[in-house]
Amino acid sequence: MKKTRSMLVGIAIVLCLALTAATWSAEKGTPENPWVIGMSQCNLGEPWRVQMNADIKSAADAAPSIKVIYKDAQNDTLRQRAHIEEFIGQGVDLLIVSPKEAAPLTPIIRNAYTNKIPVIVLDRRVVGEDYTCFIGADNKKIGEAAGRWIAGKLNGKGNVVELKGLMTTTPGQDRNSGFRKGIEGTEIKVIFEADMKWLEPDARKEMESALARFDKIDLVYGHNDPAAHGAYLAAKAAGREKNIIFVGIDGLVQEGQAYIKQNILQASFEYPTGGKEAIEIALKILKGETVPKEITLKSRVFTPENLEKGGEWLPEMPASSAPAQPAKKEQ
Amino acid sequence: MIPLVSNTSQKTFISRLMQYPVTRAILALIVIFVIGLVFNGGGAFFKWPAHRDMLRQYSVFGILACGMTIVIITAGIDLSVGSMLGLSAVVFSLLTIHRDWNPWHAIPACIAMGAILGVVSGGLISRFRIQPFIATLAMMVFARGLAKFISGGMKISTSIQQADGSYIYKNDPAIFKMIDSRILDGNLAVVTLIFIFCLFISWLILSRLRIGRYLYAIGGNEEAARLSGVPVIKAKIFAYGMCGLFSAIAGICQAAQEYQGDPEAGVSYELTAIAIAVIGGTNLMGGRGSILLTLFGTLTIGYLDKILSINAVSEAGRLMLTGVIIVSAVLLQRRRK
Amino acid sequence: MAEKKPILLMHNISKRFGGTAALEGVSIELYPGEAHILAGENGAGKSTLIKILCGVYSEYAGRIVLENRPVKFSSPQDAARHGIAAIHQELSLIPAMSVSDNIFLGREKMKKNGTVDFSAQTIASQKILKRLGIDGVDVHRPVEEYPISIMQMIEIAKALSMNSRIIIMDEPTSALTEPEVNKLFETISALKLQGHAIIYITHKMEEIYKIGDRITVLRDGRFVAAAPIADMARNALIRNMVGRELNEQIQRRSKVCAEELFRVENLDIADPQGNRNLVNDVSFSARKGEILGIAGLQGSGASELLNGIFGAYGPVSKGSVFLNGNPFVVRSPGRSIEQGLALLTNDRKTTGLVLGMSIVENITLASLPQYSPVCWMRNSMEQKAALRYKQELNIKADELSREVSSLSGGNQQKVALAKWVGTKPLVLLLDEPTRGIDVASKHEIYELMNRWTAAGCAIILITSEMPELIALSDRIIVMHRGRISARLEGDRITQENILHAAMGQEREVA
C-alpha cells in the first residue's frame, strides 16, 4: 500500500517539474508563448469604449507576441476590482485598465504595480503615481479647443446652447469647464444649458425646449456627437437647422465623422480612445524599453472642409510633457 | 368597463365627481398644467411647439404605458418593456438599414418578435407560476443581452463597417423619415398618431372585448375568476404578449426618431411606463384602471418633464421635484371611501 | 343572576352616512356576566352600533356610559384601552406570525433594554390558553397552521390578555363544527362567570336560545325590543326582526324524478399540495329534481369533494363521473361549466365574487360567451340579463352598476347564485349557500332551491346548519375523513344519525 502511494507521488512530482521546465524553456514573447495582457474595461455600454476595445484588438492582432484577455466590468466598480484581482492572481505580464472611478480602484492597481506587473491606465485617472503609464486625452483641452474654435466661427459673438454630458462624471465636467475657458473674454452667451446624460433622445428633448424658448440660437455645443445629432434633428423638425451650427465631441468614424460628411455637424472634436497607443506602449514595456509616465493623446478636429484629408491636429496638444521614467519588465 | 359608482352617496356635486378615477386623473393634469403656466420658461409654455414636442417625446413612453396598463390590470408587472424597446430598435434598424428589407416586412417581423417574447414571459408567469416581477426581470436582462449580442454592442446606423474596417454610408431609409415626420401642417407628429392608435387598440381590448373582462376579473380576484371558468392562463399570456407587442412598436418609433438602432435604448423606460400608469390611477394591485387614465397619466408626466426642461432646471432639482410630485399625485388619487 | 348595575349603557345612538340614517335612537344596556344577543336582519344596524362601540366611528349622536363614566372613543385603540374587544368573522390574526406574537400584537411585553421579552409572552400566552381550556396548541407555531376554530380561540385569548371587560363576538360560529361550537359556548360560560360581558351577534336560532341571557332586537336602524331571553319566544323574536310573522319552518317541496342525472363512481381526490387523498373511493348519485345533502364535520372532505368534482384541482386521480349517462370530463372549472355543472363556493368574498367589479359584471362572469358573440361585449344584453336575475332572485340593490362589495352578505350571495344560474347548469353544487346571511334572505334562497329543482335541476348541498340540511335534503350522505360513512333517507334522517356518522361512529340502524 505504502509503496504504490509513494510511487504515485513521485510520478506526480516528476510530471510537474517536467511541465514547468517545458514552459520555461519556451521563451516569452513568442507566438508559441505570448505575453499575456489583461485588459480591464469599466463598461462596454458606451460605443466609444467598444471602439477602444476594438482599437486594442486590431493593434494586438497585428502583434503575434502578445495575447490580450478582455474583461468587462459592466460599470460596476467592485466587479472591476475583482477582475483586476483575478488578473494579478493569474500572473499576467501586463495590465491595461480603464477604471470606472479613481479612488476605489487605486489600491488594487497599486497592488498590481508594486507586485511587478506593469500597469497602463487608459482614459480615466487613478489617484497618485503608482502606475507605469497613463494614456489619455485631455477633456479640458478638447473643450477649450472647441470653445476657441466656436469663438472663431461666431466671430466672438452669439447665442450658444450647451448640451452637457452627465455632470457627475469627469468628462462632462471637463468638457464644460474647458469650453467656458475657451470662450472667456468673448461676447458669446450660453443661453440654455441642460444635462442630457450622453443620450441622444434626451438631447433632442432639451433642444426642443431651447427652440421653443429662444428665437435666436446660433450654435449648439454638444458634449458628444449623439447629442449634437439629436439637437440637429430637433432643429430640423422646427425648420431651423440651416441657421444653427452644430458642434460635437468624439469623432468616431461611423458617427461624428459620418455626421460631418452628411453636413449634419459642422465640427467634431476627436476624443481618441488610445487603444492603439496602449498596445504600442505595452510592447515597448514588455521588451524592456523606457516609456513616459504620461502620454496625452493628440486630438483632431473634423470639419466638412478638412474631412477628406483626415482632420486637423489641434495645436495645443503637446506630444508628451512628463520626463521619461524607467519602466522595465522585471525578472 | 361600466363606470363604477362608489358606495356612499355624497352631498355635493364635486365630491361625487371626485369618486370617479378619471376626475382625479384630470385634476392632477390640471395642476401640472397650471404649474406650467406659471413657470412658463420665458414664455415657451404659451407656444404650440412646446406642447407638440412634448407629445412627440412622450408618445414612445405612452405606447409602453398602454401595454403596461394591460398587464398591471391583471395584477402583474412587466419590467422588460425598456429592454424589448431596445431590442426592437436594434432589429428594426438591422433589417431596414443593413439588410435592406422592405419596411412593411420589417415592421411586422419586429412586432411579432416582441409579441413572442411577451408570450414567453406570460407563459413563465401563468403556466410555471413564476412571480411577474422575477420573470419579467429575467426577460429584461435577457432582451438587453440579446440586443447587445445582435448589434455587437454598437449602434446600428447608416454608417456600416466593412470587413476591412472602413465605413460605407447609406441614406436614411424612407420609413425612418416617415415615422419621424409630422402631419396636419406640421402640428402632429406621426409617432403621436401611432400612440393614439395604440391607445385605441388597448381601449378595444379592455373595454369592448371579452378578453378585457377576463383581465379585470383576474386582477380583481384571480381565484374567483378561475373558479368561474375564466381561462386564466391563456388570458395572462395574452396580456403579456400584447405588452411585448407594444414594446416592439415603441422600439420601432424610437429607432426612427434616432435614425439608428441603439442597443442601450430604453434603459429605465419601464419605470416611466409604470409611473405613467400609476399616476393615471391604475392600481398596482390589479382589477382597476383604464386606458383613458393612462392617457392622462402620459400627459401629466409628459408636461412635468417638459416644464422642468424649458425652465432648464438642474438635473438634481429635476430628480427631487419629480419624486415629490409623483408621490403628491398618488396621494391626490387616493380613493375616498 | 342578581341585578347589578349595567357595565355599559349606549343611549339614543344615531349615526348618519350622507343622507341615510344607519342608526336612529338606538339604546342597549349591558350587564356584567351576561351574554347579550344583538339580533336583527342584515342592514338592521348591528355592525354600525358595534363599530361605534369599538371606536371605529367617532362621529355620532348619543351617549355611551362605561362603568358609570361617560366616554367617547376617538379610535379603536382608545376603545381597546378601555377594555372593549371585538372578534369579527374576518379574523384579525396575522397568519405567518406565531400564536404568542399574535396575542401580544401591538402590546408586546418589553424587557428593560428595549427588546421584546419573548419568553414572558410565551408564558403568558400559555396561561391564557389554559384558562380557556385549550390544549395542544404550541404558541411558537404560526397561527395559520391551526384550524379556524382554534384561531377564534386565539382571538378570544387576545381579548383576554387585554383584560377586556366587554367582548363582542360577531357570528363566531359560522366556521365552526358542532363540537367546536360547544367548546366555544363553554368558554363563554366561563367568561360570564368571571364577570366579563359578552355581546353576541348571531343569526342562528338555536344559539340564541342556548347561550343568550338577554336580547336586543334592531330593525332598520331602530331599536325594536329588549328583554330577557326567556321572555321572547321564537316567533316573537322573528316577528320583531322582520316585522312580520315568518313561519320559521323551512319548506321543501320535493319533486324528485326516478331518473338519475348525476353519478360519481369510486372517486379519489388528491390533495393538490400534498401526497394524501382528501377524498377516498366515494360513489353516489343524484336524481333529477333532487336535493342531495352532504353532511360532515371539519376535515370530512365534503367541500373538497365538490371542488374536486368541479375540476378546481384539475383532473381526478381515480374514478369516473357521469352526467345524464354520458361521461363527464373533470379537467377545469371552465370545462365543467361547459358540461352543465356549477359550484357555489363556501367563501363568497375570497373565491365567489370579484368584489371590485360591479353587480352586473359578477353576474355574467361565468357565462360571458353568452353576452359576447365573436368576443365583442354586448353591454345591453348583459344589463337585460342582470335585471332579470335581480328580479328573479330578489337582489336588493338600487343600481346594478355599483360594486358588489357595497351589498349586504345575503345580497352578495344572491349575486353569486345568479352568476351560477346564468350558466344554465344541470347540476348545482352548493357549498354552505346560507352562511352568514340574514333570515329573510335564507328563506328566499330555500325558495329558489325549490324552484330550480322543480325545473329539473339536481342540487348537491353542503350545509353545517342541521335543521336546514334535514329540511331541505331528499337524501343525505354523511362524510367522515374523506369517505362516505352513511347514506340516509326517509325516517333514518335524524340529527343523531347524522352526527354519529359524521363523527365516524357506527350506529345500529333502528
Image (cartoon, coloured by chain):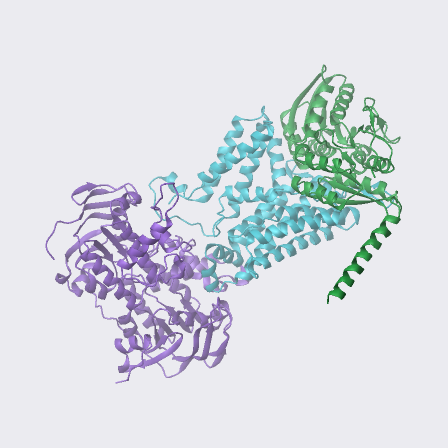
Chain colours: A green, B cyan, C purple
The image quarter containing residue B310 is top right
In the image, residue C15 sits, relative to residue C497, either above or below, namely above
Which residue is drawn at the image coordinates 58% and 28% (left, top)? Answer: B313
Please state if C317 lies on the left or on the right of C4 as rendered: right
Which of A255/C397 is in front? A255
Which of A162/A142 is in front? A142
Q: How many marks?
A: 0
Q: Where residue B249 sits in the image (x, y, percent)?
A: 65, 48
Residue C180 visible somewhere in the drawing: yes
Please state if A152 lies on the left or on the right of B237 as rendered: right
Q: Where residue C296 sits in the image (x, y, percent)?
A: 34, 72
Residue A32 visible somewhere in the drawing: no
Which residue is drawn at the image coordinates 23% and 70% (left, top)? Answer: C249
Which of B106/A112 is in front? A112
Q: Where residue C266 sits in the image (x, y, percent)?
A: 45, 80
Which of A50/B118 is in front? A50
Which quadrant holds the C terminus of chain B? top left
Please state if B161 lies on the left or on the right of A167 as rendered: right
Residue that lies at the very extreme toward the top in this rendered image: A185
In the image, residue B106 sits, relative to residue C467, either above or below, namely above
Q: Where residue C307 sits in the image (x, y, percent)?
A: 43, 69
The image quarter containing residue A143 is top right
Residue that lies at the very extreme toward the front in this rendered image: A3
